[in-house]
Amino acid sequence: MTDLTMHLTTEEIELWAQGLLPAARALHLSDCSLCRVEADRERKVILELVQLPHFAPTAGFAERVLAQVKVPTPSDSWKI
Amino acid sequence: MSAASDQQVVAWAKQGHDAAFRELVRRYERPVFSLLYRMVRDRALAEDLAQETFIKVLNGIKSYRPEFKFSSWIFKIANNAAIDHLRRKNIDTLSLDGAPSAETPEQMRATSLQLGDRAESPLDEVENRELGTAIERAIGRLRPEYKSCILLRHVEGYSYEEIAETLDLPLGTVKTYIHRARNELRGYLEDRRD
């Protein structure tokens, strides 16, 4: 059993920020202002990070790549 | 094909199906390009490195070992390409006072970087818009190894163990890097708010 007075670890804070920390451990936050402040600050950064978008390369990227790829032919697999 | 697992698509690619290669590019062009773009902060360069990564991966598809995740393999190669580039760039960086070989004031002037010489191109504008937010600028200030870890963790949603495998780092190091990276990001973002 985990002691409720034990401060949250970095990984537990990350889990909490993602809503994944087991309720029994999350209870600690209601009693510990130190962990609560730390967890709130951490959550803000994590939220900004998880909302970052993916960027797309310019149009025709796949064609430019595939033009330089040698697709193995079925007969290649017979060669030793 | 879009519902198939990566392992299945790779198996088809190994058998020589064109469509499987195209599918692998479709699945990973954005994640790989985004990682590289945030690492080097230059669109054209990131695209060159992404192209280099895909060509290496797809031409070497027969050597892919299915016990590893395909995504780990491609991110490993992309990350190595970015780190290699950043190392070379550090060595090649020109001083504001001119090339190291410049001996006379004229030579120094001729080889020095002229800040403000270049008008902002349309590509610069796109880069400023895409990477100009506070969080993107803060990420840009991180050390490359912190950047890779934090981007794989929070943008790609990798577990610590997957990051360790992808970047060939001990698990403890990955945890330390991510913790330090978030601390630094918090510092940069809080400085901005003050």
Image (tube, coloured by chain):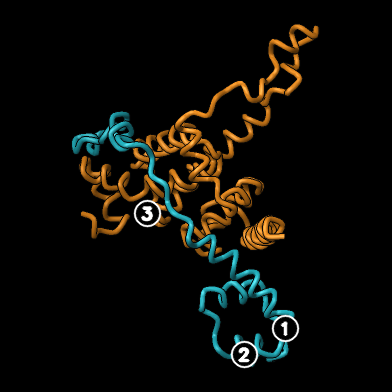
Chain colours: A cyan, B orange
Q: Is B24 situated left or right of B153 in this image? A: left
Q: Counting other residues with Cα less than 10 Å from the Cα at mark 2, is it few (<14), some (14-19), or many (20 or more)?
A: few
Badge 3 and badge 1 in a common chain: no
| The disc label shown at residue B66, or none | 3
- The answer for how far apart the CA atoms under marks 2 and 1 are is 12 Å
Q: Give the residue pinned by disc 2.
A: A27
Quarter of the image with the C terminus of chain A in it: top left
Q: From the viewer's perspective, is the residue at label 3 or at label 1 nearer?
A: 1
Residues at circles 3 and 1 in contact by the CB criterion of under 8 Å: no
Q: Amino acid at mark 1?
A: Ser
Quarter of the image with the N terminus of chain A in it: bottom right
- The answer for how far apart the CA atoms under marks 3 and 1 are is 47 Å
Q: Is A1 situated left or right of B78 in this image? A: right
Residue at x-position 55% and y-position 88% = A23
Q: Amino acid at mark 3?
A: Pro
Residue at x-position 44% and y-position 54% = A53
| The disc label shown at residue A33, or none | 1
| Picture mark count | 3
